[in-house]
Amino acid sequence: VLLQIVSGLFASDGIDTEGPLSNRVTTAAAKTWTRIHEWNQDVLLILIVLHVLAIGLYYVLRNENLLGPMITGRKLVVTTPLRSAGALRAWMLFGFAVVCVAALVFWATR
C-alpha cells in the first residue's frame, strides 16, 4: 500500500490525471511512476482476492468465522500477554509508514 501511495504522488498520465508531486519530476520519471502505480494496483487487487479466499478457507477448513470479527473489529479470544504485542506492532508500522511518506514528500519538494 505504501508503494501505491508513493507512486500515486508522482504518477501522471499526461492528459488529465496527475499526482500532486508529478510536476517535481521529469516526464520520464512520471511515466515510470505511472507504470509502477498501475502494476501495483493489479498486485493489490490480487492480494485482496487472496485475502477473501483465505477468509473462506478458514471458515470451511477450520470452522472459524473471521468475517464478523473483521467487520466489527471484535473477536472473543483467550487473552495472553503476547496479544498486546500485535497492537503495539501495528502502531509502530503505522508510524513507520507515516515517516516514510513524510520523508518522500519532503525529499520531492526540496
Image: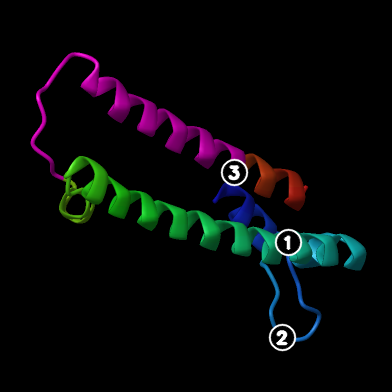
Q: Are marks 2 and 3 in contact (CB under 8 Å)?
A: no
Distance between mark 1 and mark 3 Cα atoms: 14 Å
Magenta highlight on residue 99:
yes
| Closer to the eye: label 1 or 3 | 1
Rendering coords of residue 101 (x, y %): 59, 45
Does label 2 or label 3 sit earlier along the sequence?
2
Magenta segment boundaries in residue numbering: 74-101
Give the number of the mark in front: 2 or 3: 2
Q: Amino acid at mark 2?
A: Asp
Q: Nearer the viewer, residue 67 or 85?
A: 67
Q: Is residue 83 left or right of residue 30?
A: left
* Residue 79 forms part of the magenta stretch: yes
Q: Position of residue 1 (x, y in %)?
A: 54, 51
Residue 2 vs residue 40, the one in the foreground: 40
Q: Quadrant of residue 71?
A: bottom left
Per the rendering, the mark at residue 102 is 3
Sequence-first disc among 1 and 3: 1
Q: Amino acid at mark 1?
A: Phe
| For residue 60, side relative to residue 88 (left or right) | left
Nearer to us in this view, 20 or 32: 32
Kindly identify the residue that appears in the image at 74 percent across and 44 percent down. 107
Alpha-carbon neighbours of circle 1 within 10 Å: few (<14), some, or many (≥20)? many
Of mark 2 and mark 1, the one earlier in the sequence is 1
Q: Residue furthest top?
A: 81
Coordinates of residue 19 in the picture (x, y in percent): 68, 68
Looking at the image, do the residues carrying marks 1 and 3 touch, with CB atoms under 8 Å apart? no
Q: Image point 80% across, 67% down: which residue?
A: 23
At x 81%, y 80%, the residue is 14
CA distance separating discs 2 and 1 = 14 Å
> What residue is disc 2 on?
16
Q: Which residue is mark 1?
A: 10
Secondary structure of the residue carrying tag 2 is loop
